[in-house]
Image: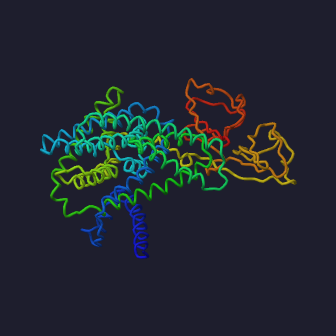
Amino acid sequence: MANILILIGLIIIICIFCNKISFKIGVPVLLGFILLGMLFGSDGIFRIPFENFKFAEQFCSIALIFIIFYGGFGTNWKEAKQVAPASLLLSSIGVLCTALLVGLFCRFILNFNILESFLIGAVLSSTDAASVFSTLRSKKLNLKYKTASMLELESGSNDPWAYMLTIIILSLMEGTHNPGPIIYLIFAQICWGILFGCLIAWTASWVFRHIKFESSGLDSVFMIAIAILSYALPTALSGNGYLSAYIVGIVLGNQPIGNKKALVHFFDGLTSLAQMVIFFMLGLLAFPSQIPAILLPAAAIAVFLTFIARPITILGILSPFKAKLSQQAIVAWSGLRGATSIVFAIIATVSPAYTKNDVFHIVFCIVLLSIGIQGTLLPILSKKLKMIDNQENVLKTFNDYKKETDILFLRLQLKESHDWNQQLIKDITLPPKTRIVMIFRNTDKIIPKGDTKLETDDILILSAIGYEDDQDILLTEIKIHKNHKLCGQPLSSLAWKKSTAVLIKRGSQSIIPYGSSILHENDILVVASDEH
């Protein structure tokens, strides 16, 4: 037992160092995790025997719950909703079209069995959220036309559709030819997935709004339970648990939840560990000695998928939205295949359905090519097509606001002898470029106004340029467009009871607001409020 734990600890540490190395040489880190697993596997240097596909399927399925849930939780809906129609079509119709085209290629060009052909198409039909998230974040690809948001929403929401297709085709391969069970399975996958996702999201939102957790960290434990239930409850009725988990994640991620910074940190660590273990385990399962036998068909499928199936699908879906060709090219090239495709291939491997070809190693090889070639060349191609826009910020597509704001919060406890004690806020002189954004008085939180009187032992939270979030202060961005009701208005005209302005971002400037500050078109107003 001790030897196994030592090995696990060392492997995790090696994966972390692989992360730093891959960032320097420009190769996607997830590829490093897979290659490391192959190095330790049965055909590798260390020859660790591991062929338990059933265990791998169960573990990876559980890990995918949290990866897909956090994919939704981290999606900034304010940024994504502008491209939501196109993204959701890509994640649904796009998955069906990709599966169909790849299936036809496997059937008529590679001469595979018809159901096996469409099984491979279904398994490969979704882009991998972990691979896309990792590439966009690590390379900080600030893409034009909200393309990063489009890719995030597509890759986060298309796995449930690919999973549904995989399950339906496996049912057909297992001998379920009666249309009744298949029709119910389609109904259950979509309807129960959406219904349970909405119900669980509403319930969890109510809990976060009305119940305060007494111990720090319990909110993270509660969120884990919600993610598990969001998958398990619909799955018990043959519903799509991954669809439910994604819906719950995206709803909760865009709610004003207290202590969100800690939740983001926790799930960042959890999903990073899950991705490391999944990709390492998938590499451990692979037998490099078996890859030469399937290399040619795998390479042929990879080329067809990358240069024909994906571009045709993107062209057909995005052209009605009048998307520029450069944007379509980047979206097509960003269709990275990753862990989800291999996990679905494992599901096919452990199912009773008979497959003539080695589906697992075919998909495994395609994923290696996709991450290694497409992931590596994506930043280069983005620059060549002039799709990089430094005015954009890829981190805005994630609900982790702390990474892209310039506010520093300072804590000041007011002693009896302090000059501000018993003074009205409007009568005190604050340091330049600072203001009071919150007052903690005993157990109360007070939004400060000009006529608020300061008292002994008040804890003042002051804002200044430079950002470090406080867990009890929630920040919200308001983009001031030309027709916005705040455009051209001074902040003193606003009658907010539960919030206050703490920062105005005007181009590259960060401005501390006062009552006389006038809001201009294209300003970004940062507002602080209490946890509700």
Residue 350: image quadrant is bottom left
> Residue 147's x, y, as percent?
40, 38
> Residue 459's x, y, as percent?
77, 51
Above or below, 279 relative to 403: below
Above or below, 428 relative to 520: below
> Residue 80's x, y, as percent?
46, 36
Above or below, 284 relative to 478: below
Q: Is residue 222 left or right of residue 305?
A: right
Residue 159: image quadrant is top left
Image quadrant where one finds the N terminus: bottom left
Q: Camera-side residue: 486 or 211?
A: 211
Q: Is residue 517 left or right of residue 59?
A: right
Q: Camera-side residue: 428 or 171?
A: 171
Image quadrant where one finds the C terminus: top right
Q: In percent of the image, x 19 and y 64: which residue is there?
A: 289
Q: Residue furthest toward the top?
A: 483
Q: Is residue 141 left or right of residue 49?
A: right
Residue 312: image quadrant is top left
